[in-house]
Every structure is written in C-alpha cells, then in structure tokens.
Amino acid sequence: MAETPARLLIVDDTKVNRMLLTRNVEMLGYHASVAENGNVAMERLHEEPFDLLLLDIEMPEMDGFEVLEAIKLIPALRDLPVIVTSSVEGIDNIVRCIELGADDYLPKPVNQVLLKARLSSSLEKKRLRDEQKMLLRRFATSEVVEDLQESGFALGGRRVHVSVLFCDIRGFTPLSESQPPEETIELLNAYYSLMFEAIDSHGGIVTMMIGDGLMVLFGAPQPLDDSAGNAVAAARDMLDLMEEFNVGRVVIDKPEIKIGIGIATGEVIAGYAGTQDRATYTCIGDKVNLAARLEAHTKVANCSILIDDATRDALADQKNAEAIGDVLLKGISEPVAAFSVQQD
Amino acid sequence: MVEGSIDLSVFNELQDATGSNFIKELVETFMEEAPGILAELKSATTTGDLDQFRRAAHSIKSNANVFGAHELAELARQMELSGLGSDQDATNKEIAALDASYERSAVDLKDLIDG
C-alpha cells in the first residue's frame, strides 16, 4: 500500500452497515469516514478530499441516486470513484447507478474478497487519473486545466479583454553559443522558475514558451479584475527576481542576465487552436502583436518594460509609467504611444 | 448448518472475516437499532408514508442478510417489494410475522455471541 492510506467515505443510513463496511475497509488498510445520508455525505465531500465513495442507494433525505447526480455537477468531485453497495431490488436500479456514473456495484452483504478487488482497481484508476492531471498541469496551467474540465475541449475562440505580456532574455543567442548546452538549459530552468513565480502570483498564464521567450495572458481563460495592473506588477516582480538572480551570477563570474518585457491591453480572441489531437490555449489579435513588438523595442529604447497606452490608462497608479513618445514598430503602420515602466 | 433462525455459514464467515469482538459489537448494534426501524415501519403504516415503509423494510432486510437471518430478511424483502398496500389487515399480519421473526433472530444471535 502507498505511504498514506486511501481515504474512503462510507455512506449508509443503517448503523450496522456503516460499522461493517468501516470494519471491512479498515481491515484492507484504508481509512474510513462515515455519513448517514446523502446530505451529510455532500457536506463531508466539500470539507475534505476523499479517494473513493462507498455509496448506499436507499437512504432518507438524499438518496444514492441524488448523490450520484450531485457529484456529476461539481467539477472537483466529478472524478471521484463511486462504488455503490446496496441490496436495492431490481436490475433497473443497478443500471441506473452505472448510468449515473457509478464505477461499480456490489450487492450487500458485501463480499470481502470482491470488495478488496473492486476497491484496489477503482483506487488504481483514480491514481492514474490523478497522475494524468498532474502531468497535464505540468504542460498546461491549472487555469487551462480547470477551463478544460469545466467547459470541455473545443477548438475555437471567444473575445476576451486581456493584457498580453511578452518577455525574453537580451542577447540570449550569443550567450547560449558561448557556453555548453547543459549550462544553457540550467540557466533557462532557473530563469523560467523565477518568471513563473512572478506570473503565477499575479494570476497570469503562460501560453507559449519558445527558447527564452514567454507569452503570458492576464485575464483569460478566467477573467481578472485588473489585468493591466496584474501584468505590470508581474513584470516588475520579474525584474526584481532577475536582479537577485544576477547577484548570484556575478559571484560565480557569469554575465548578468537582462530581460525585456512588453505589455499591451485590449480585446483578443482566446481559445484552443490546433487540431483535435494536438491543440494549445492561445490568443491572437493586434494586441498580441503589439506586446511582442513593444518587447522587442525595449532594446532600442534601452528600458526594461514597455507598455501601450491602454495598459497605462488602466493602471491605478501611473506615476512610474513614463511616456517615451510615439514609436514606430515593425509591422505596425501607425506610430504607437509607448510608456516605460520604472522600478521604484 | 442452521442454528434456529440464523444461517451459521453466513454468521461464521462474518465472524472469521471481522473477528469475534467486532461481531459481538455488531450484533449489539443491530439489536439497538432494529426496534427503531420496526417502529418506523409501523408508523409508516399509520401515516401512509410509502417511502418510509419501503426504506424501513429495506433496512431490516439489509441488516438481516448481514447475519444470515434468512427468514427475517425474506419477510422484509416481501414487504419492500410489495410496498405498503391498502389492506390494513394484511399489513398488520405481515408486521406481526416480521416482529416475531425478529424476536427469534435476536434471541438466536444473542446466544451465538454469548457463546
């Protein structure tokens, strides 16, 4: 058995059955909690995480069918394995349990050998699902995972108001050519973990990582109250963290790492683009282009953070945003007002 | 092998699987709970609560099966399946038979746990 025993919630209206099932699962090495009807079970499920539900059908107040229906509507509980243990009469009732999402049905009194087999199989399936979810989280942000779980996967986009942030390392190509590839990967990993820390703590999601470049959305898939403020705050944290990082670099006689950041705010189309098999959450629109161009322009303007006027206008505190005049950016026909954000 | 109203193959298997201390506790719990469930069954016949009647019969059946009290389980099962009918006399007879069967099972179960 794994380090921590699986936690089971036993739902049954008769005390004899609760005691017996508790005894059964405890003898198998699992941890058991009990609830005497569906309402109590739903409360318990909201209070703490469980790995599996052993559910009776015939119960007062809220019966097993209603519990199965309720669980399906709650994203956090949708994957919870449910084994129905009942002596309910009629095969149509058993069919109904399975149709409502129960993993399995065990007739009462429960046979200990069958119970053992069903529990370990259901818990193993849950473990694999949890692992997949963890894996998904590694490649997609938890916001995207949540969005996928709530709305399902569908190609196509919708209009959202976001702040788009681009960031990359100045002179990364010559730097990476001057050192062994292992060192470059190590540097990138350190850089990414710092950037992700700043991005996560301000509600941003990374939609693209290319080499040393990052594209980050603030305000999608979940809306943010102040996407511009969050994006600028994240950018400033990114600079602060890099400054600390460089202190360590200087000590070991390595060149400092400089980054440039561009931010633009406005309406974009965000959604899943790709094919049915391979797709990514991304966004497209003028603002994406603008953010990327502003980021590139930080090198020309010799500053670290450049934002567009919509981002600046949305900021509650604009004293650190200094106008650098209208700039002509590649791929954008009209000159654009740009603002350099200073650190305190 | 049957001792009175209890199927010993069921009872002994349960005892072997869960331990004699536990089964003593379980039987005692059953005897504490069952009168309440039987009372619910009776009150359902006077109030005409079909759900409560079915649920109470179901609980008796389910618990009786745990201990191998086949007769009690079967009587309860018949009541669960047929539900609360309009024939008051028939229902009263069923309940009387169920009560008597429970009493026999309770005595036999008590004998078994007291060794």
Image: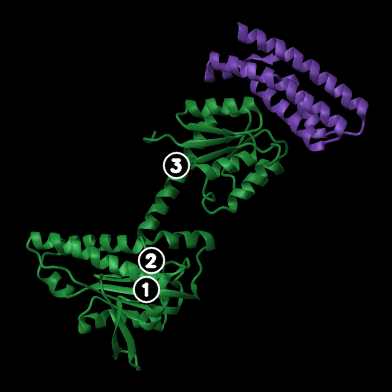
Chain colours: A green, B purple
Instruction: Locate residue A207 relative to residue A125 in the image: left or right.
Output: left
Question: Which numbered disc covers residue A204?
Answer: 2
Quadrant containing the C terminus of chain A is: bottom left
The residue wearing badge 1 is A317
The residue wearing badge 3 is A124
The amino acid type found where label 2 is placed reads Gly
Residue A267 vs residue A202, the one in the foreground: A202
Pinpoint residue B23: horizontal percent, then vertical percent: 58, 17
Q: CA distance from mark 1 to mark 3?
A: 52 Å
Mark 1 vs mark 2: give the one in front: 1
Q: State which chain disc 2 sits on.
A: A
Q: CA distance from mark 1 to mark 2?
A: 20 Å
Classed neighbour count for the residue bearing mark 3: other residues with Cα under 10 Å, few (<14), some (14–19), many (≥20): few
The amino acid type found where label 1 is placed reads Asp
Pinpoint residue A325: horizontal percent, then vertical percent: 29, 89
Pinpoint residue A283: horizontal percent, then vertical percent: 42, 75
Please name the residue shown 33% across and 87% down the image.
A337
Instruction: Locate residue A291 relative to residue A31 in the image: left or right.
Output: left
Question: Which numbered disc covers residue B87?
Answer: none
**First reached walking from the N terminus: tag 1 or tag 3:** 3
Q: CA distance from mark 2 to mark 3?
A: 34 Å
Please name the residue shown 63% across and 24% down the image.
A16
Residue B92 vs residue B80, the one in the foreground: B92
A157 in relation to B78, above or below: below
- The quadrant in which residue A342 appears is bottom left
- The quadrant in which residue A260 appears is bottom left
